[in-house]
Image (cartoon, grey):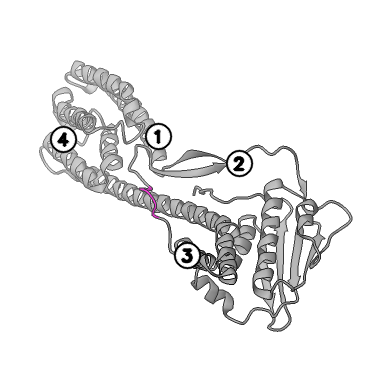
Amino acid sequence: MAKRERVMRMSVEQPLWRALTAYRVLTMLYAVGLFATAYDEFVRPWVAVAYFAVLCGWTLATLPRVANAARCTKPFLAADLTMAVTGILLTTVADAHERVQAGGPTLPSIWTAGSVLAFALKGGWRWAALASSLVAVANLAERGSPARDTVHNVILVCIASVAIGYVVEVARASERTLARALEIEAATRERERLARDIHDSVLQVLAMVQRRGAVIGGEAAELGRMAGEQEVALRTLVSGGLVPVSRVSEDAAEGALVRAVEEEPEPEPGGPVDLRALLAPYAGARVSLAEPGAPVSLAPAAAREVAAAVGAALDNVRRHAGEDARAWILVEDEPDEVIVTVRDDGPGIPEGRLVQAEGEGRLGVALSIRGRLRDLGGSAELISVPGQGTEVELKVPKDATDTRGKAEQR
């Protein structure tokens, strides 16, 4: 299986940056149009014309700067706010004193709010409060007195920017939490997959060496004892908590990043495979296989996982019901799902034994059987009555695919 690292980028704030870009252009055009309609009322219109020429050039040239948080640097924010404050103060030079006192608009008009909002998106509500305070001081200096309209506009800009800054901070914290949860889920699924593979191979071999060594005796008994110790240690490692995860989120230009190592399946040689062909090798003198007369088609990965789960169930029969126990495999091909039932005539499982086994690190049923079917979108149900044997019913949808080891994006 080839592995590749997939980087998933999640950002709630990125649409806000795009909206800010459009806002700056539209408010620039609005400010220019507002000046053009009142051109004759300005006492020094050339001052306004010069300012608007600079403002238009600045706005258009700095559009890439407000594309995301990484490009919107502190020096740019300072220069942008300076452009807004300068325009407010130049209003008293370019416009008539009567219009200023009557509450006429400043030269940059509502374009100023774009500078304050950039502070909010970049640094949160504290930066927004600082920028809006500087704009408030400039407006009060331009008017010379705290007029009602001026106070109203200043408070409106301050509240809006602080609120947006707070929302951005909450969104960033939520993204980091989601990124952490996604990687923990990916790490857990990968750990469970490894545990299933270990249970189906290494642990069984160690258990067999321990049993045979005890029977043979001598040096083989010592080898069996060591194998038993390693089996216990390995079971403890497999069942003990989550593997440590790396740093799962970073503060980045466009939101939180999630790095997950994802298995990239090798191309399958053909289409669906016949599940009967994978289950046939399990049939033998003490294992009977009942199957439909027609092929039971499943996706290759899903068919292999179902066959492995059946193998794990039969292994449990041999280990816990004894070598002489009989088992039956029944395959049912339903319209929407495939049902495979494994039944034995052993003594059954005492009540509470499965929970106890999981606590001891014996995860055959939990991972090798239920875990496999869960990853396929199916289910595994175990029914056992002491003295009447055990039945394991596996259900898998016909459109099932193996989804293990993948991290999901919300």
Q: Earlier in the sequence, mark 2 or mark 1?
A: 1
Label 2 close to label 1 by CB (< 8 Å): no
Q: Residues within 10 Å of mark 1 (few under 14, many from 20)?
A: some
143 or 314, which lies in front?
Answer: 314
Q: Is residue 148 magenta?
A: no
Q: Which residue is mark 3?
A: 226
Dot 4 amino acid type: Gln
Mark 4: which secondary structure? helix
341 or 180, which lies in front?
Answer: 341
Rendered position, 61 above or below 297: above
Dot 3 amino acid type: Met
Mark 1: which secondary structure? helix
Foreground tag (3 vs 2): 3
| For residue 311, side relative to residue 97 (left or right) | right
Q: Which residue is mark 4?
A: 101
Dominant SS of magenta comes to loop
Q: Position of residue 118 (x, y in %)?
A: 29, 37
Q: Position of residue 266 (x, y in %)?
A: 62, 38
Q: Which residue is mark 2?
A: 265
Mark 3: which secondary structure? helix
348 or 173, which lies in front?
Answer: 348
Q: Earlier in the sequence, mark 2 or mark 4?
A: 4
Q: Which residues are magenta?
A: 244-248
The N terminus, quarter of image = top right
Q: Earlier in the sequence, mark 4 or mark 3?
A: 4
Q: Which residue is mark 1?
A: 18
- From mark 2 to mark 1, how far is it between C-alphas? 37 Å
Dot 1 amino acid type: Arg
Foreground tag (2 vs 1): 2
Q: Work out whether residue 196 can be spotted.
A: yes
- From mark 4 to mark 3, how far is it between C-alphas? 93 Å
- From mark 3 to mark 2, how far is it between C-alphas? 37 Å
